[in-house]
Amino acid sequence: TSGVLVQPQQPGAECPEDSGDYCGLQETNSPFVFLSVALKFTDKHEWVQVEGGVGIVGISNYAQEALGDVVYCGLPEVGQRLEQMDEFGALESVKAASELYSPLTGEVTEINTELAENPGLVNKDCYAKGWIIKMTIEKPEELDGLMDQAAYDKFVTSLE
Amino acid sequence: MSQMRGGQPLVEVVRLGLVSYQEALRLQQVYVNRHRSGPAHALLLCEHPPVYTTGIRHKPYPEPLLDQLRLLGADVARANRGGLITFHGPGQLVCYPVLNLCSFKKSVRWYVDQLEQTVIALCSRFAIRATTSPHTGVWVGDNKICAIGIHCGRYITSHGLALNCCTDLSWFDHIVPCGIEGKGVTSLSAELRRHASVEEVVPHLLHAFTQQFNCQLTEAAQDGGESLTPVTSAGTSALTNLKDN
């Protein structure tokens, strides 16, 4: 397993539950989380992590900062079929509703019901507890078109 | 069409006059779609006949409650914007910037801040001290003078702000505006203790907008372009462009 350095997390952040064979968590003074499966990113700042043939989807740290405090998550229905780039929901922050776009083609298998009570998870723990949906991966080749961590970091730098 | 002048984005001012909320939604979509072929920033200005609107968080407002509002003689509409329930009506300057944030800054939080600062600057031109608060919008003390609620998809903005110029504020008595208990609403006229019409305020808003967003404004061509058929009611509003009359 190759470890991948993820964007800085808040100190003490927990690993995603299904992080695979290895997950090394460093303590509060070094908030980096190593995941066994690499994240892929879209240019709309969504990330997708593949686990057991299912894609977990969320938004990146860059995106959650640009949004501000999320107060509401409008999520799709389980079973809804999404084409890549379809709008599948919206996040509301500072009186702004921002669309979410599907990184892949597939079917929604799960939505993060925690976000109903605690939408701020999207800000506080965007790579782990702030996950938004899980979906099947109908066209695995779409993953090849997404950015890996290094490419995404470069992309974000170019925006600033 | 050149979209930049001297490095500043060019924004087209579109004066819609008095239009229904639904018609304004339709027109916003036309302007949103224009961005598909390249930057085509627009600033839609209008007034609405009385209407209560809700945003994507519509669950706090079930049909029976909305029916009560309809009985008051207002329309009721649901929008895909952020923010809770609010009221639009004559005397309120409604401004819908349809911008591509790629030409400005790709942050929704920044964009909303800029809208707030624009209105604060406008108020200061009238010697009114307006502020922001933890609740989005522009406040004079504990009273909201301008509501803000936007939508952003693929960096294209829609919906926008609603500034009370000489709005009949009693319409707000029937709702908890924007879901914020214990606060009131106000208008430029109420603060100035004199009538301040939408017509008087528009140029100040446009000036503040250009300053805050560092952009240049251009007026829509008067050839009645195919995408625009503003619907005006029997009366005219302050914003109706009189050139064709």
Image (tube, coloured by chain):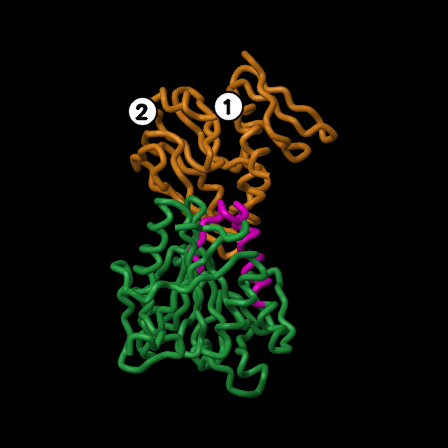
Chain colours: A orange, B green
Which region shows up in magenta?
B96-119
Q: Which image quarter: residue A85? A: top left
> In this view, which residue lies farthest toward the right?
A29
Q: Alpha-carbon neighbours of circle 2 within 10 Å: few (<14), some, or many (≥20)?
A: some
| Closer-to-camera residue (B202/A27) | B202
The amino acid type found where label 2 is placed reads Glu
Q: Alpha-carbon neighbours of circle 1 within 10 Å: few (<14), some, or many (≥20)?
A: some
The residue lying at 50 percent from left, 53 percent from top is B5
What whole-number distance in Å separates the C-alpha atoms at marks 2 and 1?
A: 20 Å
Where is residue B184? Give x, y as percent: 55, 75
Subunit ID for the residue under disc 1: A
- What main secondary structure does the magenta stretch of the protein show? helix
Q: Which of marks 2 and 1 is nearer the N terminus?
A: 2
Subunit ID for the residue under disc 2: A
The amino acid type found where label 1 is placed reads Asp
Q: Could you tell whether A98 is left or right of B226 in the image? A: right
| Closer-to-camera residue (A46/A125) | A46
